[in-house]
């Protein structure tokens, strides 16, 4: 029996590793891997993608563009999307582009097997001991890769909630994960500001010894437009009240998704206006003593059809790094 040529296309080494380990036992399959959509398309054109497990949020060429190229070029791959972007509109769009199914991350091996069986893609198990062949072996997973993937899933949950509240499609980024000294964080945020005035909302969080600050940062020029989108349930909705509500929604949803992945219960403080209408330089000056060395996660959301962009930053304390590493070890091994 010839092996099914399976392509796992995801920019996260951890996600690829989890999918490969979750494949049905005994399935005669030859596995190839791609770290972005461009590599994935090259592999498919070379005949290494009878079945494709495809992520959506990737650099260079994303999953939507891969599906569009498959349709345009008439490539016969059968695609199952496996993504952290769980918006209803994302599911509708990929199915419209030809994906056979959508599985939310992290992919449940039982659901993956049921989906393959339902789509008649799972051939009978082979009796040969080397029926499952992994081309190139399992990828090595670094702490930053594992943590970025965990954040990606949490970010997608928050994006889906925001999409339901606002009735819009939220364009999700690839989250940035970096370790900064206070001065380096200062410079990174100054680069992001580009001279504009900002309003920031700050919420502290703690759980299982892991602690930090969440910052929701808006350019002042976009605050009123966001308030208009969220005014559907109230005649008078002050802009700062809107920002406080939005912070609770997004920070709470992200922390909930993160807590589920690393098995920690987080509590969060009430949101506070931090340096209202202040420059980022003033925000850093007022809070430099709290941030010191930090693990910084940056998520830059934008709303399709609206000129609205905002950043959600999670700044984890230096003391949290070792605990986070231990929590993620079981995902990296």
Image (cartoon, rainbow, N blue to C red):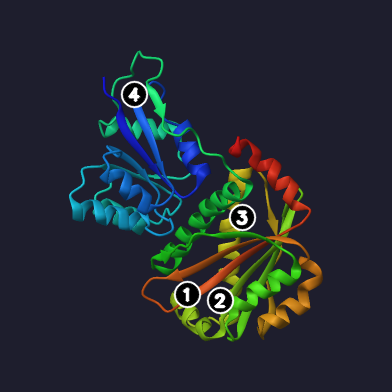
Depicted 29 relative to depicted 264: above or below: above
Residue at x 58% of width, y 46% of height: 146
Q: Is residue 284 left or right of residue 123?
A: right
Q: Regarding mark 4 in the picture, which secondary structure is present there? A: loop
Disc 3 or disc 2, which is closer to the eye?
3
How many numbered marks have been drawn onto this rendered protein structure? 4
Marked residue nearer the N-terminal end (3 or 2)? 2
Q: Are marks 1 and 4 in contact (CB under 8 Å)?
A: no
- State the residue position of label 3: 255
The residue under label 4 is 28
Q: Quadrant of the C terminus?
A: top right
Q: Is residue 100 visible?
A: no
| Contact? badges 1 and 3 (CB < 8 Å) | no
> How would you rate the neighbour count of disc 2 (Cα within 10 Å): few for under 14, some for 14-19, many for 20 or more?
some
Q: Is residue 214 above or below residue 199?
A: above
Closer-to-camera residue (228/326) = 326
């Amino acid at each position: 029996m010839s092996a099914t040529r399976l392509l796992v296309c995801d920019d996260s080494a951890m996600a690829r590793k989890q999918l490969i380990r979750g494949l049905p036992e005994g399935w005669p399959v030859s596995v190839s891997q791609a770290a972005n959509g461009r590599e994935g398309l090259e592999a498919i054109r070379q005949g290494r993608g009878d079945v494709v497990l495809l992520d959506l949020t990737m650099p260079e060429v994303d999953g939507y563009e891969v599906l569009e190229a498959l349709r345009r070029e008439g490539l016969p791959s059968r695609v199952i999307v496996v993504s952290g972007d769980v918006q209803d509109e994302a599911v509708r769009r990929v199915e419209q582009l030809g994906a056979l199914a959508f599985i939310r991350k992290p992919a449940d091996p039982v659901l993956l097997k049921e989906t393959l069986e339902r789509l008649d893609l799972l051939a009978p198990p082979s009796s040969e001991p080397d029926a499952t062949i992994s081309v190139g072996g399992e990828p090595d997973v670094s702490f930053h890769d594992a943590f970025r993937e965990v954040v990606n899933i949490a970010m997608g949950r928050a994006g889906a909630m925001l999409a339901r509240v606002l009735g819009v499609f939220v364009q999700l980024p690839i989250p940035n994960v970096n370790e900064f000294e206070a001065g380096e964080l200062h410079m990174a945020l100054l680069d992001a500001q580009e001279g504009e005035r900002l309003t920031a909302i700050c919420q502290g969080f703690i759980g299982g010894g892991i602690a930090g600050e969440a910052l929701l940062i808006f350019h002042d020029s976009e605050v009123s437009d966001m308030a208009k989108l969220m005014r559907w349930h109230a005649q008078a909705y002050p802009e700062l009240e809107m920002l406080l509500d939005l912070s609770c929604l997004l920070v709470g949803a992200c922390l909930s998704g993160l807590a589920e992945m690393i098995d920690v219960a987080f509590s969060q403080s009430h949101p506070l206006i931090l340096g209202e209408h202040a420059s980022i330089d003033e925000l850093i000056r007022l809070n430099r003593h709290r941030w010191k060395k930090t693990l910084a996660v940056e998520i830059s959301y934008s709303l399709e059809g609206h000129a609205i962009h905002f950043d959600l930053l999670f700044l984890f304390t230096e003391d949290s790094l070792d605990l986070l590493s231990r929590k993620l070890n079981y995902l990296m091994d």
